[in-house]
Amino acid sequence: MAPGVARGPTPYWRLRLGGAALLLLLIPVAAAQEPPGAACSQNTNKTCEECLKNVSCLWCNTNKACLDYPVTSVLPPASLCKLSSARWGVCWVNFEALIITMSVVGGTLLLGIAICCCCCCRRKRSRKPDRSEEKAMREREERRIRQEERRAEMKTRHDEIRKKYEENPYARFENN
């Protein structure tokens, strides 16, 4: 299997570990936030880190501009800044990479859930025994039938012996 390819649903502890790592990455960003009243345009031609101290700011890497985040839309429009150049929250993640990553992760999760559902449904549907189980069941049944035949044979033999000695209790002493 190729490295980086999802092999099924992610274990619960990995999700918690990933969530904790993301939280640790965003704590410094949240701790260094400026009050929302500060204007984003004041940080134009400064550094990305200075601009993104304010949560409501968006950094555009192409023109080194610090802009107010367009809260009316989820993603900033291309007229404001290209997605590959837009930064928000942290400077090392652009919106384009974020969208691709989230799409891949979401698709992988949905695919994993769908595969798990299909596997569970297939197991519930195919409860009929496979060939090896059928063979074992047949052998068990044959052994049981042979044992019953032996029991019946032993019973008839014992009955004959009982009958012989019930008719003549001294029959075993007569041959001597």
Image: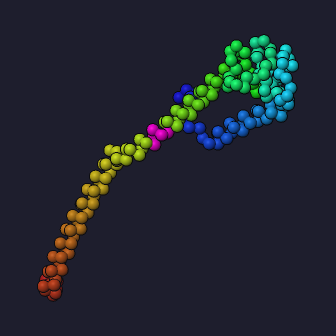
Q: Residue furthest top?
A: 63
Residue 14 pos. (x, y %) = 64, 39
Q: Is residue 140 visible?
A: yes
Report the front residue among 116 and 58.
58
Q: Residue furthest front?
A: 72
Q: Which residues are magenta?
A: 116-120
Instruction: Give the image quarter of residue 149.
Output: bottom left
Taking the spot 60% from the left edge, 30% from the top edge, the residue there is: 105
Is 26 rendered above or below residue 44? Answer: below
Residue 86 pos. (x, y %) = 73, 19
Report the front residue among 110 and 88.
88
Q: Residue furthest bottom?
A: 170
Is residue 35 covered in magenta? no
Taking the spot 66% from the left edge, 20% from the top edge, the residue there is: 96
Is 9 rendered above or below residue 102? Answer: below
40 vs 15, left or right, is right
Report the front residue among 65 and 13.
65
Report the front residue among 47 and 160.
47
Quadrant the C terminus occupies:
bottom left
Q: Is residue 174 visible?
A: no
Is 138 rendered above or below residue 57? Answer: below
146 vs 25, left or right, is left
The kind of secondary structure the magenta stretch mainly shows is helix
Taking the spot 37% from the left edge, 44% from the top edge, the residue there is: 126
Taking the spot 70% from the left edge, 13% from the top edge, the residue there is: 79
Instruction: Give the image quarter of residue 9.
Output: top right
Residue 117 pos. (x, y %) = 48, 40
